[in-house]
Amino acid sequence: MTEKKAPILTTTLAVLLFSMIVANIGGQMYGPLLPLYVQELGADMNQIGIFFTLSMIAPLLFQILGGWLSDAIGRAQAMAIGSIAGLAGYFVFAFAPSWEWLLLAMVGMAMATSFVGPSFQALVAEESPEESRGKVYGIVQGLFLIVGVIGAPLGGYLADNYGFRLMFMIATTLYGTATVIRILMARKIRQEQTTPTEKPSFVHLKTSMASIFGLLTAGGIVTWIFISDGVGDVTFSMVGNLFPLYLNNIVGISMTELGILGAIASVASMVFMVVGGTLSDKYGERVGIVLGNLLIGGAIFVMLNVQTFALFTVAWILLGVGQALVGPAYSSLISKVVPQKLRGTAFGLFSTSLGILSLPAPYVGVLLWETFGPKVPFYIPLIAMMLMLPVVWIKFRLPKTPDAEEPAPAASPAEG
């Protein structure tokens, strides 16, 4: 009698993945269009730069805290707490009378992203075997990309035809549904829990941060992940919110077409995501990271040198495939080089990386746009990415010995 094969996705992972999809359909509805919404509420280019610079402060404050809280109280519990803050942010988005009010919404969304994102990333690692972790990340991230297929074109269509208010009300309803699922799931997990969890405390936080700092300064893979991620954070923060403005204001792409481009990228990612995860498991994470970044760089270059919508679809296909190769490999690599009890904190840290240095980046991007032209800011992350790829190839190689794959931290939370 053959032994029954375990499902690729556990029940806990499947339910929380469903909540992620529902929540982020709402997020994808407004995300690509947010700079245009800020503009519609009365902000000029200079104020848009200030808005996105100020909006980066809240993630800087919450991201590592959210990851640590996930390590301390549990993944589902941290996701539920963050979701309540995110729901409040959605309400502000829907009824904001001016662009300044949107800063308050961004605080709620920052707390949601900081608590939910690292928690879910760590949960995937804990619900998957190490030998197929890249594949599981690929499946999860591939399924998750349905949010772009549905959310981006739906948001563009609603904003174009009915206005941003109605679009945000629908997004709020979706996020509220996801919040209820996460709260119920957190309660269920807590009731089934048999081992006591350590209560969050300053001592626990201090010990976790000391452990992470030890990994960052050891000179190994974690150090180089932090450096490369920081370079990406700083340079891409300059242009992340300029893409829709460039495509809409300069090229003339409508909001509906922006949504279609987002959906095209998501479909491309979905098709190649499992390939990316399998490539990571078979040949090593650095292969997918380098190949994916080459494709992303190619997508940016194409975007800056074409004018027709058909050629923009080529750029977004390259972007989607590149993200499919990078995403699972990057998540798998972090999960392997950081001990389990620090994974939430680590995923939070790498979500902010060099956040202080990247804080003025959106405003700098706008200054470059206005001083040298709309295309100039986009070449900076492109050049930085290409310069970092040889470093990634050399430094992102996992040690051969199993013991070296989970380096011992300076001090573990359990010992603190």
Image (spheres, rainbow, N blue to C red):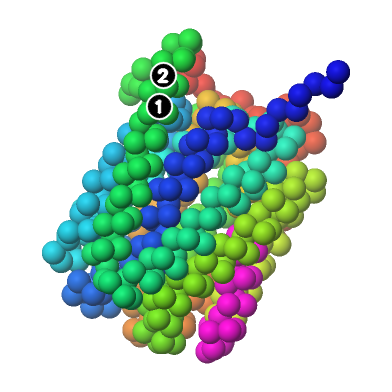
The residue at the far bottom in this view is 307
Q: Nearer the viewer, residue 257 or 235?
A: 257
For residue 218, say whether it is visible: no
The segment highlighted magenta reads 304-326
For residue 174, say whether it is visible: yes
Q: Which residue sits at x=20%, y=71%?
A: 41
Label 1: which secondary element: helix
The residue at the far right in this view is 1
User: Can you tell which mark lies on residue 186?
Assistant: 1
**86 left or right, relative to 138:** left
Question: In the image, residue 55 lies at what x, y percent?
Answer: 29, 57
Question: In the image, residue 135 lies at what x, y percent?
Answer: 70, 43
Identify residue for label 2. Answer: 190
**195 left or right, relative to 287:** left
Q: Check the image and report above or below for 293 versus 308.
A: above
Q: Which residue sits at x=64%, y=70%?
A: 318
Residue 238 quadrant = bottom left
